[in-house]
Image: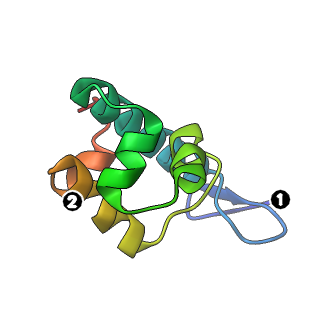
Amino acid sequence: MVPISGCWYVFCGVPKQSNRIQSVLARNVRLLREQAGWTQEQAADAASIAARHYQKIEAGTVNVTVSTLARLANGFKVEVKRLFEEGGV
């Protein structure tokens, strides 16, 4: 591994920091769902995404597109930036 701009890149060129971002997103999505009192299926329906894809987002195991971020934000009726707040939602 070679350090580049403070991030460690693995052979595929993905910074390890992306895992932290996915974790923050996953935690915030789960917190928003719990605050709404929804199941994962209800949250997926509200965001107009497949339930299995939603489960992967909440587990932090999938990268999401900008379109999916917008759908999540719309489903929870929050701004996209709220999905990435470090201190929680």
Q: CA distance from mark 2 to mark 1?
A: 39 Å
Residue at the (40%, 33%) spot, across then down: 30
Q: Earlier in the sequence, mark 2 or mark 1?
A: 1
Q: Nearer the viewer, mark 2 or mark 1?
A: 2
Residue 14, compared with residue 54, is above or below; it is below
Residue at the (40%, 67%) spot, across then down: 68
Q: Nearer the viewer, residue 48 or 73?
A: 48
- Left or right, 42 with respect to 56, comes to left
Q: Residues within 10 Å of mark 2 (few under 14, many from 20)?
A: some
Q: Which mark is residue 1?
A: 1
Residue 22, compared with residue 37, is above or below; it is below
The residue labelled by disc 2 is 74
Snapshot colouring: rainbow
Q: Assign a secondary structure to mark 2.
A: helix
Q: In the image, residue 42 lies at what x, y percent?
A: 37, 42
- Left or right, 42 with respect to 3, comes to left
